[in-house]
Image (cartoon, helix red, strand yellow):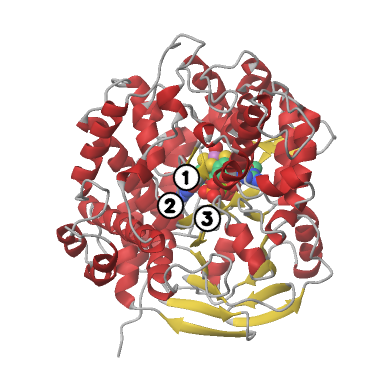
Amino acid sequence: MVKKMKGWSGKLLWINLSKNEAKVIDYPKEWAKEYLGGRGLAIRLLWEYNPPQIDPFSPENLLVFSIGPLTGLPLPSSGKLQVASKSPLTGGYGDGNIGTIFSVEMRKAGLDAIVFYGKSSKPVVVNIENDKVLFENAEDIWGLDSWETEEKLRKKYGKFAGIVEIGTAGERLVRFSTVMSQEGRSGGRPGIGAVMGSKMIKAVVIKGSRGFDLFNEKLLKIEGGRAFKEIREKPNYNFWMREGTMATIEWAQEVSVLPTHNFSEGVFDGYEGISGRTMESMKIGQRGCPNCNMQCGNIIVDVDGKKSELDYENVAILGSNIGLSSLKEVGTLNRIADQYGLDTISLGGVLGWVTEASQKGLTRNIDGRKIEWGGFKTYKELIHELTFRESELGNVLAEGTSHACEKIGGCEFVVNVKGLETSAYDCHTAPGMALAFSTSPIGAHHKDAWVISWEVQNDRFSYGREKAAKVIELQRIRGGMFESITTCRLPWVEVGLSLEHYPLLLYYATGVKYNWDDIYTIADRIYALIRAFWIREYGGWNRDKDMPPEKWFKKPLTKGPLAGGKLSYDGYNNLLNHYYDIRGWDENGVPTKETLKKLGLEFTIPTLEKITNLK
Ligand code: PTT
Ligand code: SF4
């Protein structure tokens, strides 16, 4: 008899929307141990079951919701859900990490993953109770925004049901639409909401009551309690509770990395209007994810008198990056993005890019408006137009900056990597962060390696091996471990919770004694498999795909203490060589056969050999 797993259920729910069928299946037990869960499980499933090179909007493209062995447990910030698919924005691997009761209920339902396959013929709410699935007609809510949708569904399914949904943008297949929950939670930057929309899923509801087996529940609770206590006692806890990530605005301005005017500068004259201090003076409350004692969503009232949840990325990218210095106006754009279910970071990237394009006269042929930096009213109109694909310009912008610049020109000042618009750090003078963006497994997102704070404090301008090694170390912990145990990383990143809790918590949950070498190997396995997936989907690879935006090399900063600063091509190539070398990838960024074998990824070799000259 197969021994029952602890910490994982070993089960996933496979939902076929084309046939309105669902079944629970056991996935291979070794996948749990070798990939942990969350992102790791998602990429293993996508590699295995996605037909190569399919259109992300085709019914065969899997949409995966997955959790990890620590999700939903009584330990800090454990209410997170991974949402993953082949991205319609980048054409490669895409995922996001969203804080929602859904993850906790999924855990209680005894499911490590939910896989959506096929396409419903009508808008649908997928209603899950443990392993029972109902496909409920959603025609009456198709067309509602994410807030209205959730409000309606809460009335029907109750306050404590796990609910995730898409807004209007996901329905209209805007390529940077996200999966939304609980008004301010948003996940899946590379268009995972659009994949949900392509399957006609308006929302997924889940309730679980089956419970789950842990290796040592008593010790897990004690260790989890210790970690909660440690967080509360940290010296910066009170400041964090007041400002959350918003204090980063002042820091970014001080060190010249605050993205300004489509990432042309690192300082912004109007930064005080959008600063952490300003936010504090306007704050009316805070909210966040389940099981968290350091909730970071800061709420202010926006221009329209509605509540908007702010953090650094949203404010910088919809503030300084488009020339807005009024926090209330920024809050309005951010809140509209939440309601429509648009990723704020890509939205700010798109608006920044189109403003620069308009200033250079490139939009003239398709749109009569001249877009000005800080043009709040025009930005509001454009957000509406791109969400509903109403105007010609709106329809082009809904495709993201890579697609848009192919249509109207201006690719030389697009600020994205692999098609995903860059998170809110200007990298003219931050080569390590540029490397982090360029080698992130989903495109230019900061979540895998926020190396910039380390970089600014330590040898900022070098392109040496130590910097590449630091990026990889952070990718292993953040992008490998946290995305796969599937809990929030901020207790460690922001208030300094000791990382040593995590191997212990993993042991008490699963009974498996992982040391740091084991955890790093799992992380490397996940990264190499994600890279193999990109190579398979793109039909080849070269190092140009791991290059930062051209602008940071060619257009130096003109303002602030680092005026004149820009990236060096030779320097960056040197840094990238170190990165590939440490990872065991060849000079084009392809994992070598030896690396693949070492990581237990032999099964990728026959596919990759057909595509590239595998070394
Ligand atoms: C995340 C990305 C981020 S990262 C921000 S602000 W950040 C933006 N937030 C958006 C938003 O809000 N509304 C919206 N419509 N779009 C948005 N897009 C952007 O999405 C988020 C937090 C944050 S806030 C961060 S750093 C941490 N990210 C984590 C992560 O990636 N992994 C992990 N294990 N823990 C994390 N903890 C923190 O979670 P994506 P959330 Mg997010 C209004 O989803 O796709 O990963 O993109 O999920 O519940 O909102 O929590 O300064
Ligand atoms: Fe969610 Fe913020 Fe808490 Fe992390 S720290 S779990 S993002 S509320």
Q: Residue at x 63, y 19 (%)?
A: 277
Which numbered marker is on residue 224? 2
Q: Residue at x 80, y 38 (%)?
A: 381
- In three-dimensional space, the C-alpha distance between marks 3 and 2, rounded to whole angstroms, equals 16 Å
| Circles 3 and 2 in contact, beta carbons < 8 Å | no
- In three-dimensional space, the C-alpha distance between marks 3 and 1, rounded to whole angstroms, equals 17 Å
Instruction: Locate residue 84 relative to residue 400 in the image: left or right.
Output: left
Instruction: Locate residue 405 relative to residue 254 in the image: left or right.
Output: right
Q: Position of residue 325 (x, y in %)?
A: 69, 21
- In three-dimensional space, the C-alpha distance between marks 1 and 2, rounded to whole angstroms, equals 6 Å
Label 1: how many Cα within 10 Å (few below 14, some 14–19, many 20+):
many
Instruction: Locate residue 297 relative to residue 56 in the image: left or right.
Output: right
Q: Is residue 434 above or below residue 269?
A: below
Q: Nearer the viewer, residue 178 or 367?
A: 367
Q: Residue at x 46, y 83 (%)?
A: 25
Q: Secondary structure at mark 1?
A: helix
Q: Nearer the viewer, residue 45 or 118?
A: 118
Q: Position of residue 266 (x, y in %)?
A: 51, 20
Q: Quadrant of ligand 1?
A: top right
Label 2 CB sits under 8 Å from any ligand 2 atom: no
Q: Amino acid at mark 2?
A: Gly
Name the residue tied to disc 3.
80
Q: Secondary structure at mark 2?
A: helix
| The C terminus: image quadrant | bottom left
Q: Residue at x 48, y 57 (%)?
A: 91
Label 3: how many Cα within 10 Å (few below 14, some 14–19, many 20+):
many
Q: Secondary structure at mark 3?
A: strand
Which numbered marker is on residue 228? 1
Sequence-earlier tag: 3 or 2: 3
| Circles 1 and 2 in contact, beta carbons < 8 Å | yes
Q: Is residue 489 above or below residue 168?
A: above
Q: Amino acid at mark 1?
A: Phe
